[in-house]
Amino acid sequence: MKEEANPEGITVKKDDDFSEWYTQIVQKAELADIRYNVKGFIVFRPWSVLAMDRMSDLMECELQRKGHLPVLFPAVIPESNFKIESKHVEGFLPEVFWISEVGSEGKKLEEKLALRPTSETAMYKVYSQWVRSWRDLPLKIYQRCQVWRYETKATRPFIRSREFYWIESHDVFATKEDAVKQVKEDMETTENVIHEKYCIPFLFFERPEHDKFPGAVHTYAADTMMPDGRALQLPSTHLLEQNFSKPFGIKFVDKDEKEKYAWQTCYGPCISRIFAAVVAIHGDDKGLVMPPEISPLQVIIVPIYNTKNRKEILKKAEQLMKSLESACIRVSVDDRENYTPGWKFNHWELKGVPIRMEIGPRDIKNKEVVLVDRSTGKKKKVKEKDIIKSVDKSLEKIQVYLMKKADKYFSDNLHTAKDKDDLKKILDEKGGFVKIEWCGDIKCADAIKEETTGGVMRGTLFGKKEKASGKCIWCGKPANQTVYISKQY
Ligand SMILES: [Zn+2]
């Protein structure tokens, strides 16, 4: 059968014009509607919501496995809570949406309410009532919710908007050692879920002093790389130490009967933003390519029939679907009458479903089906009796293939610059993360950003001792840190 051109297909190549490709895929794969009439707010459509739900489920499952429990805190934070920790206020105040009045008469609220931009100041006020004794610790809690920030940078669907969906965990410990351990556990969670399930590679950087989370002692952020060589920040985990427990009064009576301030961490994987990385990194010129672990559907069955054999073939397709469902495979039959098989092929390729199963009259006679792998386009015939085994194996293979492919692109784009000009040249021509030596002076970091038109310091690589031995790439003074620079979203 001849496959007809898809009227709703993407018309640019990802490598030629990534920005336009991204705009088109968001619209044509029906991920979001950007026409909502509030600036910076978008409508998340079913296909992206289904995928993000799977992503959140996997993340929650991992958090719960590591002892976190879910809560749901109010979306509003009274101004008095919000202003308790001064650096936090300073950092977030410019981005807060406030609720100040109610009803039709413009009646003023007694106290202004912030729509949470993040929940430290909501939760920690309550934590100060929950934490009394060492027996209450550790307290490991998370919530899956949306937050609001008045972004002034240009917004892009999933990448940056004024409302986004995330999971935030906020943990309290009796000792600093336990808090430091939690930061490492958060990094392990990031690896287990974001790399292994979503197939998104990243590096953890310790952010420099001038780019920490407002109120944190240390900020560690996982950065991935988009297809245009610019970094996208994924989750960050923060060692808050006692910066919040002191102003919020989170203290406990320890085993030695002394009253002590608690130690805290927080971790915030932004699911809607990570979804942008999934779309951008795995997608190709035909559309999305979904990793099997998070695809809303893993198999789409497309029956190929005419008016005479329609009933028989649909019956077979339903049978196949039921048997795959019994093996916990997410599957559906596209039995829509008004569309040709070729149109359906294109449609599900655009949606990125990992496996297409074709079944026609000849296949029924031969007791077989055709499987098409979305990630490679490879086709194979499979005997009906081997279907479950074969589909399972293919899904596993696709998952590994996508991870390796993404890992390769990522490692191919790690560079080292030998001098100023080299740094500019790499950032302009290739992008990616560029390793440099730095003196530690913020003036050099600012000058780099200015003169490379947007090369931002990611920080030092976590967990790998990279000693600086030479001179600062910018000012020539002795370097004391090896850091990475990239352009960013
Ligand atoms: Zn310098």
Image (spheres, rainbow, N blue to C red):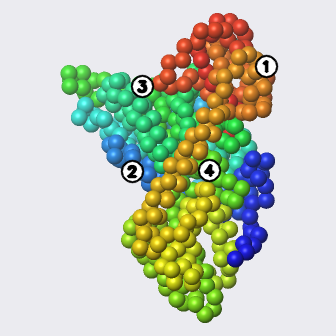
Cβ of disc 1 within 8 Å of ligand 1?
Answer: no
Disc 4 or disc 2, which is closer to the eye? Answer: 4
Q: Secondary structure at mark 3?
A: strand
Circle 1: residue type: Asp
Res. 421 mark: 1
Q: Looking at the picture, does residue 34 appear above or below residue 202?
A: below
Would residue 95 be visible to someone looking at this image?
no
Disc 3 or disc 1, which is closer to the eye? Answer: 1
Q: Nearer the viewer, residue 171 or 286?
A: 286
| Residue at 51% in and 80% down | 366
Q: Earlier in the sequence, mark 3 or mark 1?
A: 3
Residue tagged by mark 3?
Answer: 241
Distance CA(mark 4)–CA(mark 2): 24 Å
Circle 3: residue type: Glu
Residue tagged by mark 4?
Answer: 282
Distance CA(mark 4)–CA(mark 3): 37 Å
